[in-house]
Image: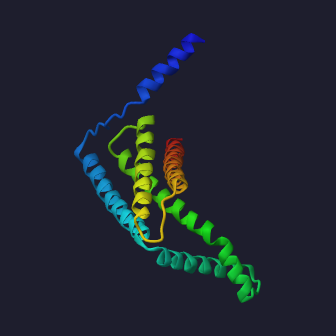
Amino acid sequence: MRQELRFIRRLMKRESKLKPKFIANEHEKRKKRLITFVTGILLSLLYVAIFGFSAQDADESGGLSREVTEKCVETVTELSGKKVSASEKDRLVDRFEKPVRKMAHFTEYTAMGMLVCILLAQWYEKSRARFGLNIGWVFVSAAFDEWHQYFVPGRYASVWDVFLDTAGGAFGVCLVALGCRLFFQINRISLRRKNV
């Protein structure tokens, strides 16, 4: 049992360090720089959008949220084929406005988690430290967003939104990891078929 614990401790120490990736040739360096540049631009645009939404006062933000929820309710009722009265539609909009807002938070930070993961994966080896840096980046961004929102008239900061945003970022990181794993498995299978 002690040997197993020592092995686990050594493994955790080895994997907990953030190690830069070694890039052998110039082509790989250019490719990584291009991916970094594009990802950085997309991440910057996402930050502008997130902080733009946070800068809206309570009335403007609530109006936008209600408008999006109305479109969602209209789409769902059209797809279901049911006729819904105006009062029923308003009741549905009132009921689903908060979940739609929270889903928007989650989705924005899922995109951020994905972009940060892609960005860091270009320059650092896969490790627990890189995963922690991904989640830490999203957490700090979410906390700063909520702090910024605190100073907007009619808005408030919520610790729960920070946790929801961080969960969205973690989900984005997991999506990228799953996508990469599937991509590499598909490539491996296709290479085996070619060799047979």
Residue 190, position in %: x, y? 52, 47
Quarter of the image where the N terminus is located: top right
Quarter of the image where the C terminus is located: top right
Residue 52 visible in the picture:
yes
Q: In this view, does 167 lie above or below 108?
A: above
Residue drawn at (71%, 88%), measured in percent from left and top? 86
Residue 78 visible in the picture:
no
Residue drawn at (28%, 46%), measured in percent from left and top? 28
Q: In this view, does 89 lie above or below 131?
A: below
Q: Which of 34 and 196 is in front in this view?
A: 34
User: Farthest residue in the left direction?
Assistant: 26
Q: Which of 151 and 31 is in front in this view?
A: 151
Residue 124, position in %: x, y? 35, 40
**74 with respect to 23 (left or right):** right
Residue 13, position in %: x, y? 43, 24
Residue 101, position in %: x, y? 56, 68
Residue drawn at (44%, 59%), measured in percent from left and top? 146
Q: How many marks?
A: 0
